[in-house]
Amino acid sequence: MEVKGKRKCKHCEEYNDISKMVKYNEKFFCENCFIEYNTKRSRKKLTKERAYEILDKLKEEMNVFLNEISVFKEFDDYICEEYYITNLPHLYYIKMNDIKNLNRKGLRKKIDFEILLEIFKNEKFKQICRNARAKKEDLVGYDAFNYDLAVALSKYDKYVYQRKKADLNKIKNIEVRQKQEQVKVFKIESSENKNILNESDILF
């Protein structure tokens, strides 16, 4: 999902496409402006070489930042659609930020929101939550999401483990198939070689 939006550049003070900017000391810069700003400022001026080194690193960090925004946006959109929520409350964003920063009780490992979204989309998970919520009253919309979120977080570690296990099994299966294909090719080549006459066979 492409991240759209503009941010104001610290140097030129113009609003530009966020995907073409970098973030430095919590401020946004156009890429060219970052070089100019840091090589021409009066204090702690950088050489152009050093400025470009830092810029390359910032561009990598920006790609990670934009990917996170994209994932969060996809997660938000799915929650709104799945739970029939028109506007997510402010409390939702506080809660998501707490989860991201491990400020929620019981969280010890960083939560990957791409994987969390996978869990919410999983049909088996949906059925488990629907069955559990059927025993409760008035759990709809945001309240239903809150309930399901608690279930998703409680099952997160197990899901990640099973996911890794499934990926390893896929790799093993691919390796087995590749070996089987190599054996087949070897047998075919061996069979063909038996039917090839040597020059000595032809002459004598």
Image (tube, rainbow, N blue to C red):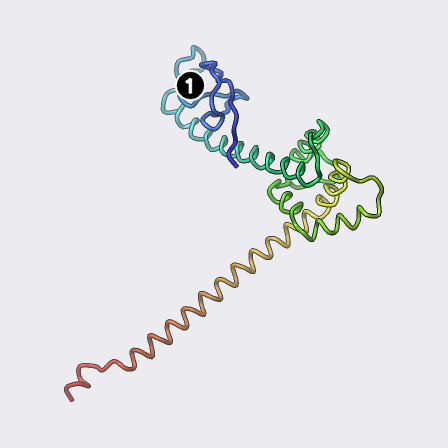
Q: Position of residue 48 (x, y in %)?
A: 36, 21
Residue at 75%, 51% in the rendered image = 128
Does residue 19 appear left or right of residue 144 in this picture? left
Q: Eyeballing the image, is 137 above or below 180?
A: above
Q: Which residue is mark 1?
A: 33
Q: Nearer the viewer, residue 169 or 47?
A: 169
Picture coordinates of residue 33 (x, y %)? 42, 18
Considering only vertical position in the picture, is 33 above or below 144?
above
**Image quarter hosting the C terminus:** bottom left
Compared across the picture, whether 111 is left or right of 134 comes to: left
- The residue furthest top is 42
Residue 130 image offset from top left, x and y in percent = 76, 48
- Say which of 134 and 186 sits in front: 134
Q: Secondary structure at mark 1?
A: helix
* Residue type beneath disc 1: Cys
Is 13 above or below relative to 161? above
| x then y, percent, for residue 131 | 78, 50
Label 1 Cα crowd, 10 Å radius (few <14 / some 14-19 / many 20+):
some
Residue 36 occupies quadrant: top left
Q: In the image shown, does 22 or 74 lie closer to the viewer?
A: 74
- Image position of 103 with respect to 157: above or below: above
Residue furthest to the left: 203
Judged left or right of residue 15, residue 50 is left
Q: Residue furthest bottom?
A: 204
Residue at x 28% of width, y 82% of height: 195
